[in-house]
Amino acid sequence: MAVKDLAETMATSETWISVWYDDEEHEVYFQYGYVDVSMTIEDFRDFVETLVKAEEKLGKK
């Protein structure tokens, strides 16, 4: 597995967030606290787009 770290940070709530990519499996992995999720890069792009739309709606409140 050839993993590339893409981003990592500590959220305001002090929860660890990290994102990495496995170029052999062509999957993106992300971790929020103790939860790990993996998905294809195409699904990850759709997921990010959905999060951005949700954040835009939250910003209007």
Image (cartoon, helix red, strand yellow):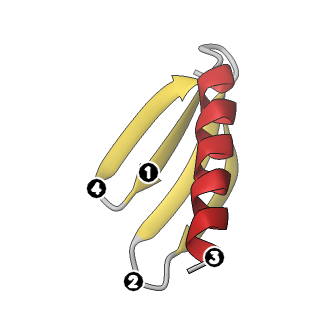
The residue that appears at 60% across and 25% down in the rendered structure is 43
The residue that appears at 65% across and 17% down in the rendered structure is 26
Q: Which residue is mark 3?
A: 59
The residue type indicated by label 4 comes to Tyr
Q: Characterize the local packing of mark 2: few (<14), some (14-19) or many (20 or more) Cα atoms within 10 angstroms.
A: few
Q: Which residue is mark 2?
A: 13
- Seen in the picture, residue 59 relative to 16 is either above or below; the reply is below
The residues tagged by marks 3 and 1 sit, at their Cα atoms, a distance apart of 24 Å
Q: Nearer the viewer, mark 3 or mark 4?
A: 3
- Seen in the picture, residue 22 relative to 16 is either above or below; the reply is above
Q: Which residue is mark 4?
A: 34
Say what secondary structure mark 1 lies in. strand
Q: Which residue is mark 1?
A: 31
The residues tagged by marks 2 and 1 sit, at their Cα atoms, a distance apart of 15 Å
* Location of residue 34 in the rendering, given as x and y in whole percent from the top left corner: 28, 55
- Seen in the picture, residue 37 relative to 23 is either above or below; the reply is below
Res. 58 image quadrant: bottom right
Say what secondary structure mark 3 lies in. helix
Say what secondary structure mark 4 lies in. loop
Q: Nearer the viewer, mark 3 or mark 2?
A: 3
The residues tagged by marks 3 and 2 sit, at their Cα atoms, a distance apart of 19 Å
The residue type indicated by label 2 comes to Ser
Q: Characterize the local packing of mark 1: few (<14), some (14-19) or many (20 or more) Cα atoms within 10 angstroms.
A: some
